[in-house]
């Protein structure tokens, strides 16, 4: 039996939960005035601290999920305004880091499924070359030519030869590659929207194709030439596909399991993130198409190709580090009257996206 003090504390917390939820609902409908926004900020500080404490000391997952959902909804209305650096800076330094952080678990899931498919495809081909036709579709590479590629060292070397064309041809080729890659990304996005399950199958299937095809070259002396042929454009291309898949999964899961946010709010939040991730994926597809056309099909040295691949990795790593640091600096909202309240960024960082 609860003591009178515990009963009073629970009643007060429940009243605060109800007030917090009402204020969030008013904010979502655009009916929150200055005093209401200040009260929302106060309750947000209280509830993020309570959420952190409950995660550390209780196992009431239902209440934790409920509080997490409320704090996530409130956070959308207490974000710092973009600095006067223009919409482009806002996208790269605010919108994209936020979307990447909120969908990180889905990106890791997509990358894991792609890797699982690749390992499975490579293993199937290593164990029995007859599995090659099952992993690489005939629309991508004719079965007879594929078998010749597997059997003949000369065929593999001919495949990896550099065919440097004229500038105009390379430009057209880059445009075609961009269009094709974008179609793949949009298919991954659409597959995720459809209850998320088709996206899982598509990621594994694409991994199977990649792993099966790679096994043809990695088992022989052509492995180095193949990696230098593949990696420079594969880094931005695969990352773009992962972002599209994560965007689709976010939309699909928000429909299937919206939680306490409600389906409309969950879908709206996921939709904003999906648009941001898709925009970033388009940029990566452009980079991949450029590299595929002007680097892969060129007579550049192996050292230059390795430098391009390294530059891609380093750039992505530096961006990830920079946006993480930016997010920490921006953790304190700049709403003026909230600054005096000492907005607590540490508990807020525990909110699960």
Image (tube, helix red, strand yellow):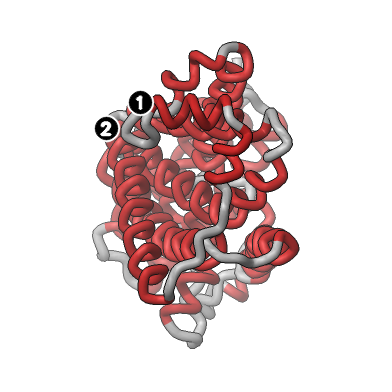
Please tell me how crowded label 2 is: few (under 14), some (14-19), or many (20+) other residues with Cα within 10 Å: some
Q: Position of residue 264 (x, y in %)?
A: 25, 44
Q: CA distance from mark 2 to mark 1?
A: 7 Å
Of 10 and 112, the residue lying toward us? 112
Q: Indicate which disc residue 286 carries.
A: none
Where is mark 1, residue-wise? 197
Residue 18 against residue 315 in the figure, above or below:
above
Q: Is residue 231 left or right of residue 302?
A: left
Count of numbered badges drawn on the protein = 2
Image quadrant assignment for residue 156: top right
Locate the N terminus by quadrant. top right
Q: Residue at x 44, y 33 (%)?
A: 206
Residue 198 against residue 313 in the figure, above or below:
above
Q: Position of residue 131 (x, y in %)?
A: 49, 15
Image quadrant assignment for residue 40: bottom left
Where is mark 2, residue-wise? 194
Q: Is residue 300 visible?
A: yes
């Amino acid at each position: 039996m609860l003591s009178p003090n515990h009963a009073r504390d629970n009643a007060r917390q429940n009243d605060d939960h109800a007030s917090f939820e009402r204020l969030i609902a008013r904010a979502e409908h655009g009916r929150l005035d200055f005093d209401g926004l200040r009260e929302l900020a106060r309750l947000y500080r209280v509830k993020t601290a309570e959420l952190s404490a409950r995660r550390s000391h209780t196992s009431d997952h239902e209440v934790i999920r409920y509080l997490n959902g409320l704090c996530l909804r409130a956070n959308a209305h207490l974000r710092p305004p973009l600095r006067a650096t223009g919409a482009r800076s806002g996208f790269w330094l605010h919108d994209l880091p936020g979307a990447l952080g909120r969908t990180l678990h889905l990106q890791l899931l997509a990358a894991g499924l792609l890797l699982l498919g690749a390992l499975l495809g490579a293993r199937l081909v290593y164990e029995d070359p007859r599995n090659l036709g099952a992993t690489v579709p005939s629309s991508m590479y004719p079965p007879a030519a594929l078998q010749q590629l597997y059997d003949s060292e000369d065929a593999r070397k001919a495949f990896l030869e550099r065919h440097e064309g004229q500038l105009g041809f390379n430009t057209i080729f880059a445009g075609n590659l961009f269009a094709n890659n974008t179609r793949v990304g949009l298919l991954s996005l659409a597959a995720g929207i459809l209850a998320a399950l088709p996206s899982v199958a598509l990621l594994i299937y694409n991994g199977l194709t990649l792993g099966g095809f790679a096994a043809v070259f990695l088992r022989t002396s052509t492995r180095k030439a193949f990696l230098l042929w593949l990696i420079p454009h594969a880094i931005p291309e695969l990352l773009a596909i992962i972002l599209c898949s994560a965007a689709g999964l976010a939309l699909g899961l928000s429909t299937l399991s919206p939680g306490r946010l409600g389906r409309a709010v969950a879908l709206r939040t996921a939709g904003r993130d999906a648009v941001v991730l898709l925009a970033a994926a388009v940029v990566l597809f452009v980079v991949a198409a450029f590299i595929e056309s002007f680097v892969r099909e060129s007579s550049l040295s192996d050292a230059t190709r390795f430098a391009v691949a390294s530059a891609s990795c380093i750039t992505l790593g530096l961006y990830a580090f920079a946006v993480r640091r930016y997010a920490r600096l921006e953790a304190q909202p700049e709403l003026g009257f909230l600054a005096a309240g000492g907005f607590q960024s540490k508990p807020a960082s525990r909110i699960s996206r």
